[in-house]
Image: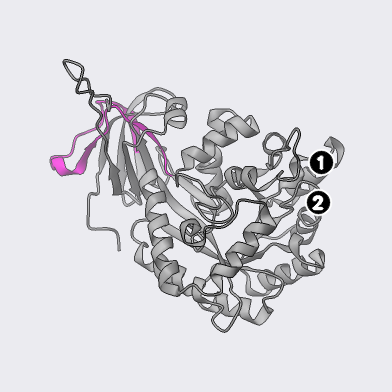
């Protein structure tokens, strides 16, 4: 059932990324028409009209790689800053004792922060835990998914390490997870571990989303994943792929060609990998980022996610896909349009969601930002936003700024 709140049938006066001012007609959760501003018929019911003059209208963003079960745990854990292995150790020590209620509270908080910034779809990896209650995280995220089902789409990937039995992973699917994944490159026998997840996904006909080659110097699992899933029709993704960004060009291009042939979706995670990688390199520290430019140029399915937010794997993060896009520009040298596509259209495509945005026939999942252009929106990330999901307004954020010592006091919220 859709939310009972504001459901506009006409968005009036918004500006698109190409600079044109438009009216956008919406019906049944879809964009049905985009016309020159001022030319669309105005409904007699004024409550059906949403005036977005001064706003840039974009596709809502999506996060194809999140960890809502870990989010916002940094303050409780107070972990040492460090690399991937240190983060895993800190998280495991905390996770052994955390409650389902703790996970629900943090995940719900984090999801709403994503939502108010414009993200209406999240794929979250959720740890299958050790000990007598391994599904605490899965149960928590199923609960959060149910709580928020009217305002956003949440997809759950059961994330398991090599010490979690296959039978337990399958119970996570039975409990409501949508897919499976692991970090096979961290296992003692990476290819054996990868084969385990490929077999589970094939047998259960579910999404497979693997953490792959999250290292500056080991390329183990991405090529094997491409080989083992070539020709699959089910959705397959590979997150991180950090080593791809440090390979010699010939090896890199060969591996990218295999990825393109297999149609694997590649998900970059700039903020977390920039933080976690390179700690042992004191001079000319290499940056942990996949080969974004080469993947795009080769025609790969490409997306980017925020990954970790304020947990042992990344102490920072603003829960805003515009931050992820900004990092793709400055760290991966994508242009602004390519970077925003990675967190919107590209992310939805990798998640197998229908296209969204201010285009006839697309899902009416929209983000309106008070900005004049896409580059301004990514550069300044204005807080004034309106978020629409399935045709309903699900979040509004407004700000105002004054300068009391100036007469008259100007407002900068435009």
Up-down relation of residue 95 to residue 222 (above or below): below
For the residues bearing labels 2 and 1, Cβ distance under 8 angstroms = yes
The residue segment tinted magenta is 33-60
Numbered circle sitting on residue 388: none
Q: Percent position (x, y) of residue 253?
A: 81, 39
Corner quadrant of residue 54: top left
Residue drawn 29% across the image and 59% down it? 2
**What colour scheme governs how the chains and residues are painted in the rendered image of this protein?**
one colour
- Tell me if mark 2 has few (under 14), some (14-19) or many (20+) residues whose alpha carbon lies within 10 angstroms of its own: many
Numbered circle sitting on residue 219: 2
Front residue of this view, candidates 316 and 17: 316
Q: Is residue 38 magenta?
A: yes
Q: Percent position (x, y) of residue 226?
A: 76, 55
Q: Is residue 304 left or right of residue 292?
A: left
- Tell me if mark 1 has few (under 14), some (14-19) or many (20+) residues whose alpha carbon lies within 10 angstroms of its own: some
Residue drawn 74% across the image and 48% down it? 259
**Secondary structure found at label 2:** loop
* Residue behind mark 1: 247
Residue 208 in view, yes or no: no
């Amino acid at each position: 059932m859709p939310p009972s709140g504001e459901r506009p049938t006409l968005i009036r006066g918004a500006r698109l990324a190409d600079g044109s001012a438009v009216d956008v007609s919406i019906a049944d959760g879809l964009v049905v028409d985009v016309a020159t501003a001022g030319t669309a018929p105005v409904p007699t019911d004024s409550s059906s009209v949403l005036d977005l003059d001064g706003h840039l209208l974009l596709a809502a963003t999506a996060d194809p790689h999140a960890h809502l079960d870990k989010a916002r745990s940094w303050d409780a854990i107070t972990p040492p800053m460090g690399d991937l292995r240190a983060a895993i150790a800190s998280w495991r020590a905390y996770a052994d004792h955390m409650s389902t209620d703790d996970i629900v509270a943090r995940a719900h908080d984090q999801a709403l922060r994503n939502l108010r910034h414009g993200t209406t779809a999240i794929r979250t990896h959720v740890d299958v835990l050790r000990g007598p209650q391994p599904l605490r995280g899965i149960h928590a995220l199923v609960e959060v998914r149910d709580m928020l089902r009217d305002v956003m789409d949440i997809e759950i990937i059961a994330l398991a390490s090599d010490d979690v039995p296959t039978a337990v992973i399958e119970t996570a699917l039975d409990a409501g997870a949508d897919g499976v994944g692991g970090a096979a490159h961290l296992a003692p026998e990476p290819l054996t571990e990868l084969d385990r997840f490929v077999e589970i996904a094939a047998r259960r006909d579910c999404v497979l989303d693997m953490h792959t080659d999250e290292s500056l110097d080991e390329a183990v699992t991405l090529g094997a994943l491409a080989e083992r899933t070539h020709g699959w029709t089910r959705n397959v993704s590979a997150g991180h792929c950090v080593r791809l960004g440090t390979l010699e060009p010939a090896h890199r291009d060969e591996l990218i060609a295999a990825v393109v042939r297999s149609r694997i979706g590649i998900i970059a995670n700039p903020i977390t990998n920039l933080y976690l990688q390179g700690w042992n390199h004191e001079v000319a520290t290499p940056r942990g980022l996949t080969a974004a430019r080469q993947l795009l140029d080769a025609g790969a399915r490409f997306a980017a996610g925020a990954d970790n937010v304020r947990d042992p794997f990344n102490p920072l993060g603003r829960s805003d896909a515009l931050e992820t896009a900004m990092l793709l520009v400055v760290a991966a040298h994508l242009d602004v349009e390519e970077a925003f596509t990675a967190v919107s259209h590209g992310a939805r495509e990798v998640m197998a969601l229908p296209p969204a945005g201010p285009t006839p026939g697309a899902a009416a999942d929209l983000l309106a930002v008070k900005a004049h252009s896409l580059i301004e929106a990514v550069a300044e990330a204005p807080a004034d936003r309106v978020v629409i999901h399935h045709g309903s307004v699900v979040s509004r954020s407004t700000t105002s700024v004054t300068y009391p010592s100036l007469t008259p006091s100007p407002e900068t919220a435009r």
